Image (cartoon, grey):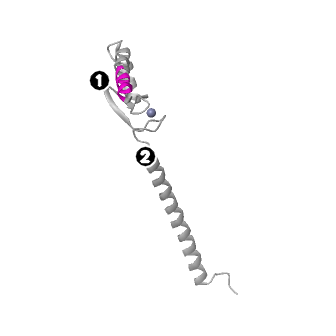
Amino acid sequence: MTTHKKPSQNEDEYFAKRDAELLRQHRQAAQRAATEAERKSHYMKCPKCGYDLLTGDWHGIQIDQCTHCHGLWLDAAEAEALVKHPEPTIFGRVFRAVMRGVSGARASDS
Ligand SMILES: [Zn+2]
């Protein structure tokens, strides 16, 4: 009588554990890849309607604008540049320029 397991049983356990670990790693990698693909599919897409965003330069401030609903998107750095711009009226100037662009885009839509 012995407390030791037979070598074949130890081997079976070893391979079962190894297979389970490999399967777990494979699933994790697949999950990461799916998450990354999902994230990439949203890159430069409008968060509201899902159409493409186009980056425009307005008085040196870059603003991403939706090609469909014409919503505006500012990165944190772009918003900061707008707020910290030496010209105090830059915010109004930029948005008036953007709104003229939007009106033009809307007019050309119809
Ligand atoms: Zn949109």
Number of marks present in the image shown:
2
Q: Amino acid at mark 1?
A: Gly
Q: Secondary structure at mark 2?
A: helix
Q: Nearer the viewer, residue 72 or 39?
A: 72
Location of residue 49 in the rendering, given as x and y in whole percent from the top left corner: 47, 36
Magenta part of the chain: 100-108
Residue 66 occupies quadrant: top left
Find disc 1 in the rendering and name its residue. 60
Q: Earlier in the sequence, mark 2 or mark 1?
A: 2
Q: Residue furthest bottom?
A: 1
Give the residue drawn at x 63%, y 81%.
5
Residue 74 occupies quadrant: top left
Give the residue drawn at x 51%, y 66%.
22
Q: Nearer the viewer, residue 25 or 103?
A: 103
Find disc 2 in the rendering and name its residue. 41
Q: Nearer the viewer, mark 2 or mark 1?
A: 2
Location of residue 45 in the rendering, given as x and y in whole percent from the top left corner: 42, 38
